[in-house]
Image (cartoon, helix red, strand yellow):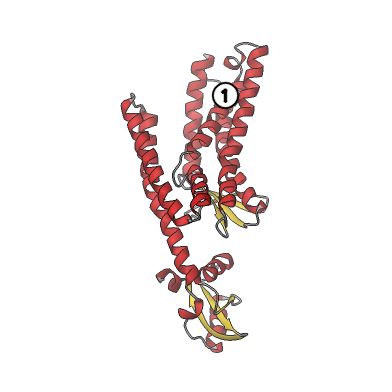
Amino acid sequence: MLFNIKNQTIKLCRIKGIQIYTDLVYFMLVSFLSIIFVRQSNLILKTGISFPLVASSILTAILCFVSLLIHELAHALRAINIGISVKRINLVFLKQAIDLEELPRSPKEEFTVAMAGPLINLIIAIILYGVMIISAKFVPGLYQQHLILLTLFYLAIANTLIASFNFLPGFPMDGGRMLRSAIWTINKNKMKATEIVIWTGRIAAIFIVMTILLRIPNLATIIFMIVVVPLIFYAGPAELRLLQTRGKLELAKVSDFMKTTTQDYLESWQTEHLKVAIYCEANDSLWSAWQTMRQKKVGRIFVKQRGQLVGSISIVQIYKV
């Protein structure tokens, strides 16, 4: 999933210059999955609870989390490859995303960035299934007797589920962005393409509900329905609002909304905030100014025209627009 998130997060690590953040929910999920894997592995192997079984279950749960991280890294590395800077990766429950400096500029760019995540999970799953098939061919029943192969089995399922979920044709899943890029290519209108994908996502959500209710629902499918279906209905309109907001900000000029600023105010602002002033041009768009403020992490940007200070604009003023 691809957009900016602000949340209470924990710094996890830095990979390829990209800071990785997560939240406590994922630590809880890893613990919960470990318990499930211990129980399920014991049912399959019938060896009783032992240290190797518990250790392999914890490792499997951690590797499932790593699979999510690899998914987001694939998005990020593809974005960097096409010239879009990535500030951070947020592994926040139901909101994992890469924080891009700018949105993909064409249908092709959006499709390839969105496709990179589920594609890498699909490749991992195919490799793991291949290892299992080859192992079973030479030693029948081995996966039922060996913790390592059982771990591969769980990871193959986990990566298959991650890929399948993200291929759903609605926002905020990657499948929604891939579908939008295809429609955008045909009708040349990203806004209309977004509106179409909102409805395909809602239809997919209704289909999921009907499928679950017509079958015998279990706890997992009920939780999936309660969590994912409202997410699909919420994320579509939010995506459209983002595009509409960007459209407004790209049409608006900084000069139309800035406040006249003196050199004395500039100097006092720098002293008070202990920051060097960041500048933009009066003819720049509000979108460009907003992007600069986000990139430089400042709440106000100063405006020049023909090299002279003429005003300033704050992020609060832009939000009001």
What x and y, as percent, mark residue 234?
37, 49
Q: Where 296 falls versus 178 (above or below)?
A: below
Residue extending farthest top: 140
For mark 1, give the secondary structure: helix
Q: Which quadrant of the rendered structure holds the C terminus?
A: bottom left
Which sits in the foreground, 199 or 115? 199
Q: Residues within 10 Å of mark 1 (few under 14, many from 20)?
A: some
Q: Quadrant of residue 225?
A: top left
Evaluate whether residue 279 shows in this view: yes
Front residue of this view, candidates 268 and 266: 266
Camera sees residue 69: no
Task: Residue at 57%, 28% (x, y): give it.
Answer: 156
The residue nearer to you, when weighing 98 against 149, is: 98
- Residue type, label 1: Phe
Task: Identify the residue at image location x=58%, y=60%.
Answer: 101
Task: Report whether 219 appears left or right of 92.
Answer: left
Q: What percent of the width, then of the height, locates residue 120?
A: 61, 38
Q: Residue at x 44, y 59 (%)?
A: 242
Residue 122: quarter of image: top right
Query: Which residue has dot 1 on it?
Result: 153
